[in-house]
Amino acid sequence: MADPATSATSPARTPALNPDTPAGPKTMDAGKWANKRVYLRLVIYTAGIHVFAGFIMLLFELGSRNK
């Protein structure tokens, strides 16, 4: 039986491990785009929460004036 550490495998037999194949870099590009979408969502959600909190504070301020 041959030693797996010393036996050579051709790139054609293991295409998923070869970074030069079209299947290799797809996940890196998808990961970068996914990170950009996450950051954009984070900014939108943060701004939306601040607007909602400001509206609630405005309601409390207007409610306290009518006492």
Image (cartoon, helix red, strand yellow):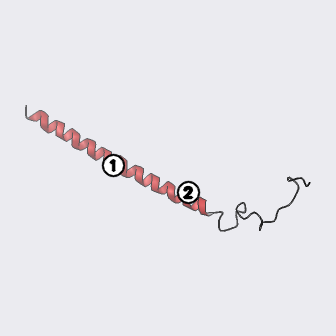
Instruction: Classify residue 57 as left or right of residue 62.
Output: right
Three-letter code, disc 2: Gly
Q: Mark 1 points at which residue?
A: 47
Q: What mark, if any, has residue 31 been given in the picture?
A: 2
Closer to the camera, 39 or 21?
21
Few, some or many C-alpha atoms within 10 Å of disc 2 (few <14, some 14-19, many ≥20)? few
* Element at label 1: helix
- What residue is shown at x 36% (from left), y 49% (from top)? 45
**Separation (CA) of disc 2 from disc 1:** 24 Å
Three-letter code, disc 1: Ala
- What residue is shown at x 87% (from left), y 58% (from top)? 7
Please identify the residue farthest to the top as the structure is shown: 67
Instruction: Classify residue 32 as left or right of residue 11.
Output: left
Residue 6, image x, y percentages? 88, 55
Which of label 2 and label 1 is nearer to you? 2
Q: Quadrant of residue 50?
A: top left
**Image quadrant in which the N terminus is located:** bottom right
